[in-house]
Amino acid sequence: MNRKTDLVVVGSGLAGMTAALIAAQSGKQVTILTHGVGSLAISSGTVDVLGYVDGKAVDDPFSAMGDLPEQHPYRLVGEGEVRAAVDWLRNLSRKGGLSMTAAEGNRRLVTVMGTLKPSWLTPDSFCAEAIEDVHRIAVITVEGMKDVHPGLIIDQLQRYPHLAKKEFFEAVLPNPIAHAHRNITPLDIARYVETPEGLQWLKDSLTPYAKLYPVLLMPPICGMDHSQQLWNQLCMALKVKIIEMVSIPPGVAGLRLREIMRKALNSAGVYVVENTQAVSAEVEEGTCRALTTVATGGENRWEADSFIIATGGLLSGGISTAPGKAWETIFGLPLDMPEQTEEWSSPAIFGKSLFASMGVKVNEDLKPVDKDGNVILNNVRFAGRTVGGYDFAAEKSGLGVALATGWHAGSLAGKE
């Protein structure tokens, strides 16, 4: 099969979906090719713009961007584009029924590991400032829920000086899913709470604790498609502040955001092709003519005027490695890495690692360039984790860079 479109986007994480939606809203005919569900499905659903620079905590990510290396994606796209991307996502989420808030500085969100995570744009249900103003807090889980242990959470939270003297209480709600054949996850409960009986179960189960504790810390279980509405309803009915904690995969909050974006893509007329993997490209004199994908039904060819590649890093298959070398997977673009693989990692557990920051070198237009800065592919842009020059884990900047580069790439493609 051969299909021609204005723009082909490869990847359905936040970067790819953002790029596709921005370009489609500019009037372009857009196709998304995706091999999986994208990283939002395992993400926190909060946009960490920039939490740390050189190991030091950042209060205002935008003020700290000037301290980043010149090749960092934020420096390339510019602070204005980052701000515009954040505002765009906040408006999109609001239209989709999910209120997200950006404060004057990084918020410290509570995680199910008992740590405080810096983030910039967060769902209202995650905003944890209320724990600063009260003394008594209940930390809640559900019987049989893996990876959410109130005792561990409390022990870790009390390591923070400003929380050390708070009175925390462990609470376990009864398991509402009878005869579960495995440990349940926050996603299981969040889906159940979407039903009338599930919402009533959660309200009844929380009522005894709401009478004693003004703040309830719990995993993200306040529904899926209607989480904002259900969270507001529970807070008002119980007369308490419910704070959802950032959880490990499956990413409940990330899936909430992904569903909003998926519906927006559908409304914008974006053609989404799932379960297909881009494996090679046809390039003539620096211009990509088409991509080839493989799926269960065989090979397909996708022509376009321009392309945006947001296939992720090592874990997502956007980057491949072998002893002494690394390359971008679809076009085979070599990455500038030392021949000695021992130099790719750091002996310090929290040290800088080339494994974490490897990626395609791009210019301000997010087009791939060689060592001398010359454009290699004139109608191809890269976005998200496939782009090099930043350490998303150490910086706490993963979804921020994905959003900013996706926005920038989609905006540029939409103007062409």
Image: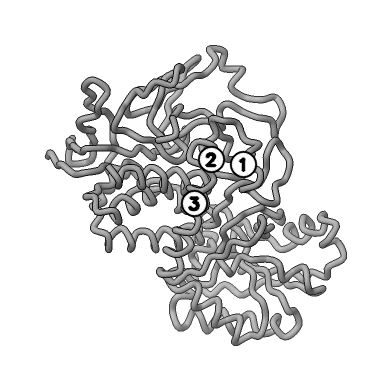
Res 333 → quadrant? top left
Residue hosting label 3:
42
Q: Quadrant of the C terminus?
A: top left
Distance from the alpha carbon under mark 3 to that under mark 2: 23 Å
Whether pointer 1 and pointer 3 mark residues with C-beta atoms closer than 8 Å, the reply is: no
- The type of residue carrying mark 2 is Tyr
Residue 325, image x, y percentages: 47, 17
Q: How is the image coloured?
A: one colour
Q: Are marks 1 and 2 in contact (CB under 8 Å)?
A: yes
Q: How many residues crowd around disc 1 within 10 Å: few (fewer than 14), some, or many (20 or more)? A: some
Label 3 element class: helix
Q: Pick the quarter of the image with the N terminus.
A: top left
Q: Which residue is mark 1?
A: 65
Q: Nearer the viewer, residue 197 or 261?
A: 261
Depth-wise, is mark 3 or mark 2 nearer the camera?
Answer: 2
Q: Which residue was labeled with disc 2?
A: 74
Residue at the image position 32 percent from the left and 33 percent from the top: 380
First along the sequence among labels 1 and 2: 1
Tag 3: residue type?
Answer: Ile
| 3 and 2 marks in contact (CB < 8 Å) | no
Left or right of residue 59, residue 87 in this image? left
Horizontal and vertical percent for residue 269?
23, 58
